[in-house]
Image (cartoon, rainbow, N blue to C red):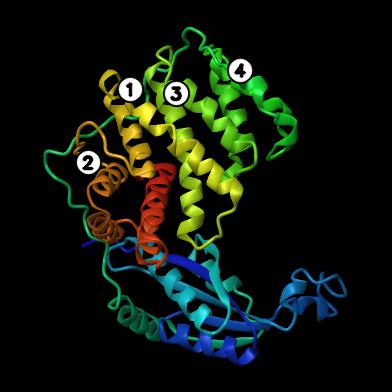
Amino acid sequence: MAASVWSATEFQVTVPTKAAANSVARALAERGHRLAVAREVDHYTRVPLSFWYNKPPLRPDLAGHWDMISLLIDSPPDGDVHWWIFQEQRKVEELAQSHGGRGRILSYLPSAEEALKNFNREGLLFELDEHLASRRRRAALRAFPARMPIQVDADAEVVESENLPSGPGEPIALHGLQDVDWPSLEHAYGPATDVPKMLLGISFNDNHWEIILDKFVGAVLHQGDIYSATAPSMRFVATIAGAPELSVGRRQRMLYVLFMAGAEVDVREAWGSKMGNIELEVRDSVTSRVPQLLKLWPSVSRSEQRFLLFLAALAGLSVPEKMNLRDSAGRIAQTMIEDLNTAEELLKNLARSNEELIELAAHDGPLKPRLIASILLLLDSRSA
């Protein structure tokens, strides 16, 4: 039997009315949340003894709304705190949405005892004793499936993607930089006048490569955002990625940058964002170069082939040979190439083992973008 693991988590739900806050609090108390309070948004700007008294509202756009804050003290039966808290977070978000609001985890607290002691009870609606909360919590947990072990083909291949040879090499010829009107384009920090210098620095393939690449990615793909300079930049990234002068680790990194740029567009589409010209140009800039990059297949390592597989899935292309990979990202990509519906079933199965995939598996957005978004999420979280 797993050792008892306790967690204390505060949830916040913001809804349009006090009645809605009361209703959400009641539902969470039925789920075994120990404490629940409701206070009007920016309540403390109206309390004379508060530090915030008479100060400008922190959330003026939510004037008149109410915050419901609850405290969950939990000891999952199998000790898998992350899995069960994620399940609870989804339930809180569903409750919030059904009442016209939004919900989130407000904080994780290291000590259940301290959390109970320090919880702000102003506006208290419910306070359950330990016995009642525990009984209700057990009933609530029975409605959720436990984490399932990942089922993998015993013969599936493990491809090493870390600690690959990544040293400098001969410089790479880069033509056409001067043909782009960089001053008219932008990246995260303003005009893209410095992008050609960064791309040249990457093409030098020397000991400064890693530093320059990080700076470049931070400018044209800053925290997943894309800009007018992103699409033309990716054309040159693809050229560098295809150069024989690159070491294994450096080529893999360049292929990942390409996939990341194209996949960010799919992430937006997966969640219902509208696609503008910039997004479509980025996707085309990446996918139009995948056929040429796939010609590298016979001459590169398995780790590089794995990232070519991701790009092929992004572009809707096949690869020269099937890869039977053990990692979840690789399995999704290979299955996408074979059949999208089978890939969707795989995503749903993986979501029973990985809480980070649950929302993408359950979402009703377009299938292919959801699958690509899942691959990117797995790669970013290194739980691939």
Residue 195 image-quadrant placement? top right
Say few, some or many: other residues with alpha carbon within 10 Å of mark 2 (under 14 / 14 to 19 / 20 or more): some
- The label shown at residue 200 is 4
Say few, some or many: other residues with alpha carbon within 10 Å of mark 4 (under 14 / 14 to 19 / 20 or more): some
- The label shown at residue 241 is 3
Say few, some or many: other residues with alpha carbon within 10 Å of mark 3 (under 14 / 14 to 19 / 20 or more): many
The numbered mark, 4 or 2, whose residue comes first in the sequence reads 4
Q: Can residue 326 be seen in this snapshot? A: yes
Which numbered mark, 4 or 2, is in the foreground of this view? 4
Element under disc 2: loop
> Pointers 1 and 3 in contact (CB under 8 A)?
no
Which residue is painted at 36% across and 79% down in the image? Answer: 137
Q: CA distance from mark 4 to mark 1?
A: 22 Å
The vertical placement of 357 against 207, above or below, is below
| Between 46 and 156, the one nearer to me in the picture | 156
| Between 129 and 37, the one nearer to me in the picture | 37
Q: Residue furthest top?
A: 170
Name the kind of residue labelled 2 in the image: Arg
> Pointers 4 and 1 in contact (CB under 8 A)?
no
Name the kind of residue labelled 4 in the image: Leu
Read off the residue under disc 2.
Answer: 326
Read off the residue under disc 1.
Answer: 296
Element under disc 3: helix
Element under disc 1: loop
| Between 308 and 376, the one nearer to me in the picture | 308
Residue 238 location, x and y as percent?
47, 27
Residue 207 location, x and y as percent?
54, 12
